Image (cartoon, rainbow, N blue to C red):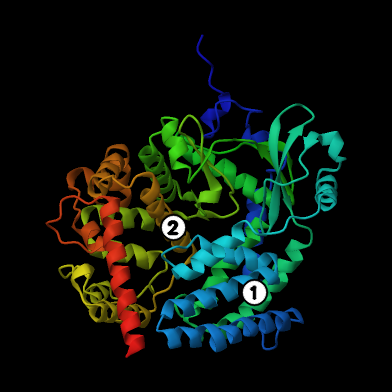
Amino acid sequence: MSKVSPADLSVGAFSSDPPWLVEPQEMVWRPGVGSLRSATQAQVPHLLRRRRTPPGGRVFRVVTDLLWALGGWYLLDRRRARREGRPELSRAGLSRRLRDTFQRLGPTYIKLGQIISSGEGVFPPELVGEFRLLRDRVPPEPFETVRAVVEQELGATLEETFADFERRPLAAASIAQVHAATLVTGEEVVVKVQRPAVTTTVRTDLAVMSWIAPHLIGRIPVSALANPPALVELFAETIVEELDFRLEADNMLDVAAVFAATDQRSVVVPRPHPRLVTRRVLVMERLSGFSFDDVAGMRAAGIDTAEVVRALLISFLEGATIHGVFHGDLHGGNLFVGQDGKVALLDYGITGRLDQSRRLAFLRMLMGGTINDQKMQMAALRDLGALPPDTDLEAVIRDLGIDQPVRDPTRMTPDELLDEIRDMVKKLLSYGARFPKVLMLYVKNLLFIDGALATLAPDVDLFEEVTRIALYFTQRYGEQIAAEVGVDPRARPVDLDGFRASLGVANDVETMTYRDLQARRQLIHKRMEEHRRARQRH
């Protein structure tokens, strides 16, 4: 006898063995969430407003700790790096000292470090590597503190709600920690509990960050690679929503609904509880599976790891370009893979939400890349806020040499490559380029998927994979894309020259696996390191 599918799979991509059924209208915590979300975002400008004087005593603690870190780097790590001709020691020392400082400063700075840690390719690798340590080195709150928060939020004793509640958390992060538990009705759940007083701490720290950030522009090597005020603004927009778990539970239902609408059943979302969700407590379905880096375990279980990455990428692109909602913080700690090969996607505190104009901009960017229409791509970036509205797109394309034949970076001297990068950055800044929140989340997710390819599908042909995904979108959404973008992908062949250019390879290259791409990157990195050392010696 075949097993009957749960009724709530029509409204969301959930597991096939439900502890309860999701009926969106019956979620007692959901009414008014839309207004709550708007009100929460409206607080950001107030929290980041310009102040003539430092915002309270907290600023002196933060400035003192930062100066101590920078002083130690300048007097010790930087000098040692110059003395030994090893510039990587300077970057590593600064990153380590900043990570130690963030950890001492508490939840807000730890959360900022965790966001930076998932920005591989956006931030320096030394900084990313150090800040990854903040993901699992956050001391948990005492159990009695957790009990007090849960009982206050749910209005009942722990024993009245749970038959069992693990004292030791499964994970402890900057904003909250997660405990395994069993409800008195028998369902196995996980309980996310917010740290006490974290809301007040975050609001104070955002005021401090917004005051300090303008003074860091160009001051230290790490901040020179990312605009500190813009980074603080991005951070504020994301963290204020994480302080209310009703918004996170609503994000779970919205992302699950997108997966259901696209019939993307290879990714599942844990069900939030219909009643046990408050501002500081979130009870949800407990799922299990392989950690995302357990490649050997997945393959031993017969799971196609290349298909895992493919499903994750397609579901992410569909959410952004077709529905305007996507998970905004993909990283290994937020994912695991079930025995059935389905990806369980966790932690919905950061979610990208696009209005119609920005969703269409993402769709044009995807379409422009598929048919190699450079002006369409640049117009999409402009409409996303990466360039000012009055930007002369033809001039940008000309100045950046986007319309010129690609130069293979593996065949360029280190000086030529550095000059080209500096020139491009200088020109982009002259045009007023910036990195808006939704674009940062989008790029950060793509960079995570790029890294996932390295471990889960290193021998997949990248050109074949891009063609396959483009054809999927053409076949499934061709009519919609033609109506919304004005270009019918069914009448335009896939043009991989733009994708080849993004990889720095000539148009006559027919195949390239991720393993090949890694080898190229490692060669470039090795040559650049040798060049830095040679310059230091001379």
Give the quarter of the image for residue 529.
Answer: bottom left
Look at the image and tell me whether residue 378 can be seen: yes
Question: Which residue is nearer to you in this view: 448 or 296?
Answer: 296
Question: Which residue is nearer to you in this view: 375 or 310?
Answer: 310
Image height check: is 176 above or below 183?
A: below
Give the quarter of the image for residue 14.
Answer: top right
Residue furthest to the left: 508
Q: Position of residue 520 (x, y in %)?
A: 26, 62
Residue at position x 74%, y 78% in the image: 58
Please give left or right for residue 162 compared with residue 407 in the image.
right
Q: Which residue is mark 2?
A: 442
Q: Which mark is residue 101?
A: 1
Image height check: is 94 above or below 192?
A: below
Q: Position of residue 13 (x, y in %)?
A: 51, 34
Number of other residues with Cα within 10 Å of mark 2, as a class: few under 14, some 14 to 19, many 20 or more: many
Look at the image and tell me whether residue 41 can be seen: no
Number of the front mark, 2 or 1? 1
Amino acid found under the numbered disc labelled 1: Thr
Q: Position of residue 326 (x, y in %)?
A: 48, 49
Residue furthest to the front: 84
Please give left or right for residue 374 compared with residue 318 in the image.
left
Amino acid found under the numbered disc labelled 2: Tyr
Tell which circle, 2 or 1, labels the residue nearer the N-terminal end. Answer: 1
Residue at position x 74%, y 51% in the image: 280
Q: How many marks overall?
A: 2
